[in-house]
Amino acid sequence: MSSSTHVLPLRVYLFVFFSLLGLTAVTVAVAFLDLGPFNNVVALGIAVLKATLVILFFMHVRYATRLTGLVVASGVFWLLIMVGLTLADYATRGWLGVAGR
Amino acid sequence: MATDNLAHHFDSYEQQRESASLGVWIFLVTEIMFFGGLFTAYILYRSKYPEAFIAGSHQLDVTLGTVNTAVLIFSSLTMAMAVRSAQLGKNKAIVGFLVATIVLGSAFLGIKATEYHHKWAEHLIPGPNFHLEQTHLPTYQGKPVSAGLPTGIVGDSPADVALPAPARSDIQAHAQLFFFLYFGMTGLHAFHMIIGVGLLAWLIVPSLRGRFDANNHNYVEGIGLYWHFVDIVWIFLFPLLYLVGRHG
C-alpha cells in the first residue's frame, strides 16, 4: 500500500533528455537567423518548453499531487505578476506629469 | 536494509513523500522569486540599452555556452536516474549516478571558470579596467562611435571629458551593465551548483549504506528537485546571455 511510488520507465527520461538536447540545438540555430522581434519570442518559447519538460518529467510534477502542481503554477504566476507590475511601472513613467513640477 | 523511518505525524509513506516534495517546492518557489528579480533587472536594462547588450553578448563564447548547456542537461538526466534508482531501491546504482552527476556538474563549473578567466583576460570585468574591444557599431544611440579614443566611464579621466564622441563611453558604460548581470546571474547560478555538488556528495554516504528504497528516498528526490531547478535557471540564462542578436 505505502509503496505506491510512480517509477517512470527509462524511455521517458531518455525521450526528455534527447528532446532537451534537440531544443538546445534549435535555439542556437535560430539565434543566427534574423527573425526580427521573433528571435526573442522563439528563444523564450523554447526555454519555456524545455523548462516545462524538466518540471513535468524530471521533477515528476505530472505525477505528483494536485497540491504540488498548484504550488508550482502559482509560483510561476506570482513571478509573472511581480515582473508585470515592475515593467508596467517602468514602461509608463513619464506618461503623466508630476503635479507641482 | 530498509529502515522503518515513517515519522509518527504521517499516516503513510506516501503522505510523507508528498510532504517532503511539497516542502522542497515551496523552497524552490522562493528561489524562483530570487532569480526572478535578476531576470527583471535584465529585461529592464536590455530594453533600455539593446545595442550594448548585443555588443556584450557577442563577447561570450557560444560554443562553450552550448557545450555547457548540454553538460548540464546530461547531469539532469543522471540525477533523474539517481532518483529512479532510489525509487527502485538500487542503492549501488544511486551511487554511480550521483558520481556521474557530480562529475558533470564539476565539468560545467570548470568550463564556467574557463570562461570567467577569458573575460578577465579580455578586460570584461565591470570596473575601472573594463574595456569592450570593438566596435562593429558605427553609431550608438544615434551618436557616432569613434574608435581609438581613451575608454572608461564618462568622467573617469581628463581624457574622457574631452571625448568628441560621447557614444563611445556610453557603450562602455552600458555594456558594463550587461557584464554586471552576466557575472551576477551566472555567478549565483554557479554558487547554487557548488552547493548542489556538495549535497550530492553528501548523499553518497547514505546510498552506500543502502538507506534508500521505494518508501524512503526523500533526500534523493528533494536534492534532485533542487538540481533540476538549477538546470532550469540555466535553460533561461543561456539564450538570454549568449544568444542576443547573433544574426547579422
Image (cartoon, rainbow, N blue to C red):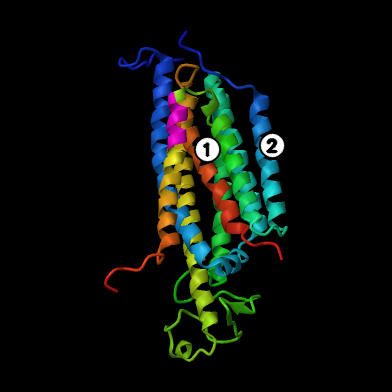
Q: Is residue A71 magenta?
A: yes
Q: Position of residue A17 (x, y in %)?
A: 65, 36
| Main secondary structure along the magenta-highlighted residues | helix
Q: Which residue is mark 1?
A: B228
Q: Chain of mark 1?
A: B
The answer to which of A27 and B71 lies nearer the viewer is A27
Name the residue rendered at 45%, 11% in the picture: A2
Whether residue B97 sits left or right of residue A100 in the image: it is right
Q: Quadrant of residue B112?
A: bottom right
Tag of residue A18: 2
Q: Quadrant of residue A33?
A: bottom right
Q: Is residue A14 shown above or below A7?
A: below
Whether residue A25 sits left or right of residue B8 in the image: it is right
Looking at the picture, which amino acid does disc 2 mark?
Answer: Phe
Q: Which residues are magenta?
A: A67-74
Q: Position of residue B6 (x, y in %)?
A: 37, 15
